[in-house]
């Protein structure tokens, strides 16, 4: 019998990628079996690492920020977007040492974002723009709030060691926000679901050549991801235990992210919505000027697998 291909999927240690953790655990425990492939999760430290690995083809696929995936596609990396990995699930945390009471108080401060091409950057930009504040990099002119890209796992420490309160806070995927709050260094300022209810953020992409070579394998993975997502929504307690191990986090912190409030992160509806993705790219092009042109989302998305998996 031919050996099953190992499908390498990149991810970060964030709650947004918990469907991969649950699927990996089910396979490990023999609760599920893949006939057409073996799953090889590959952990990365930051978004630039994920983007680079997809570009040089050292990964077959990844759980990645939707706008980053769009940008890779635009730059010629042949990818297909198959599923969302979750909806909502991020948080804007204010630094306790920075005396932030209102949005306006972020003026003159630095705010950490996980990546330029992220929904986090977009949501924060929208929040500031509504108050007439201009975010930008330190090198840009006439900015009110300085944005600095920091890998999610490094954000808690950056806040902890900021004795002067120069960092206003950060906007990031969980559980890093809740981790900082639990340690007493930060406070919740906004949950991303309250800025854009049910917003997309991370997506599951595969390189087209891998997909075309192994369609049955990719279908198995998508079907399992959809089931894992439904299981996380339905049973957050066992999901938090798996999440604690998979994300190297305190399981109490993960459980809080999955349950308080119940719609803080949603993993039961993973069918990609083209209008939402279009909203992101248009905002990043027209308002933020960080995308130079729009992509053809019809060509970028391949929803066959999501449909066959019964994704909602």
Image: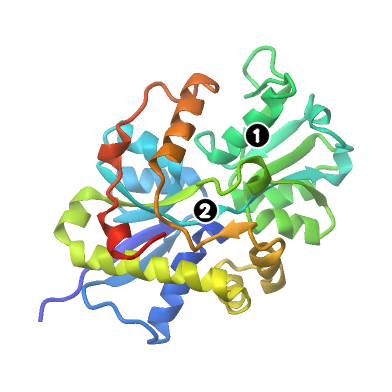
Residue at horizontal 49 percent and vertical 20 percent from the top? 286
Provide residue 33's location: percent of width, then percent of height: 31, 81
Q: Quadrant of residue 67?
A: top left
Task: Estimate the x, y position of residue 234 in percent, counting from the top left.
Answer: 56, 73
Task: First in sequence, mark 1 or 2: give its number.
Answer: 2
Q: Which quadrant would the N terminus be assigned to in this image?
A: bottom left
- The numbered disc on residue 45 is 2
Dividing the picture into quadrants, the one containing residue 97 is top right
Q: Residue at x 42, y 34 (%)?
A: 278
Left or right: residue 216 compared with residue 105: left
Q: Secondary structure at mark 2?
A: loop
The dot on residue 124 is: 1
| Left or right placement of residue 65 versus residue 56 in this view | right
- Real-space CA distance between mark 1 and mark 2, rounded to the nearest whole angstrom: 22 Å
Disc 2 packing (10 Å; few <14; some 14–19; many ≥20): some
Task: Check the image and report above or below for 221 versus 303.
Answer: below
At x 69%, y 31%, the residue is 127
Q: Secondary structure at mark 1?
A: helix
- The x, y position of residue 72, in whole percent, is 35, 37
> What is the tally of numbered marks visible in this picture?
2
Q: Nearer the viewer, mark 1 or mark 2?
A: 1
Residue 193, x across and y down, in percent:
64, 48
Which label sits on residue 289? none
- Horizontal relation, residue 79 to residue 273: left or right: left
Q: Residue furthest top?
A: 141
């Amino acid at each position: 019998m031919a050996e099953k291909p190992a499908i390498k999927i990149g991810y970060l240690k964030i709650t947004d990628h918990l469907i991969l953790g649950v699927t990996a655990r089910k396979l490990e425990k023999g609760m599920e079996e893949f006939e057409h492939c073996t799953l090889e999760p590959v952990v990365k430290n930051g978004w630039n690492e994920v983007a680079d690995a997809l570009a040089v083809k050292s990964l077959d696929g990844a759980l990645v920020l939707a706008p980053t995936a769009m940008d890779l596609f635009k730059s010629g990396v042949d990818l297909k977007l198959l599923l969302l990995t979750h909806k909502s699930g991020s948080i804007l945390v204010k630094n306790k040492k920075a005396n932030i009471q209102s949005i306006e108080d972020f003026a003159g401060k630095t705010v950490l974002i996980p990546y330029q091409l992220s929904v986090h950057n977009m949501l924060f930009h929208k929040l500031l723009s509504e108050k007439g504040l201009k975010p930008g990099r330190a090198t840009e002119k006439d900015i009110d709030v300085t944005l600095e890209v920091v890998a999610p796992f490094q954000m808690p420490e950056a806040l902890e060691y900021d004795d002067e309160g120069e960092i206003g806070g950060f906007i990031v995927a969980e559980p890093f926000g809740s981790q900082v709050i639990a340690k007493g260094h930060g406070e919740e300022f906004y949950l991303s679901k309250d800025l854009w209810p049910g917003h997309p953020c991370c997506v599951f992409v595969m390189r087209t050549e891998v997909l075309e070579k192994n369609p049955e394998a990719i279908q198995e993975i998508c079907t399992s991801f959809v089931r894992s997502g439904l299981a996380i929504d339905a049973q957050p307690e066992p999901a938090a235990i798996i999440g604690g191990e998979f994300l190297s986090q305190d399981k109490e912190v993960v459980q809080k992210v999955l349950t308080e409030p119940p719609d803080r992160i949603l993993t039961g509806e993973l069918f990609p919505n083209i209008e939402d993705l279009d909203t992101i790219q248009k905002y990043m092009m027209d308002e933020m000027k960080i995308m130079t042109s729009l992509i053809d989302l019809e060509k970028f998305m391949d929803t066959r697998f999501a449909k066959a998996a019964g994704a909602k």
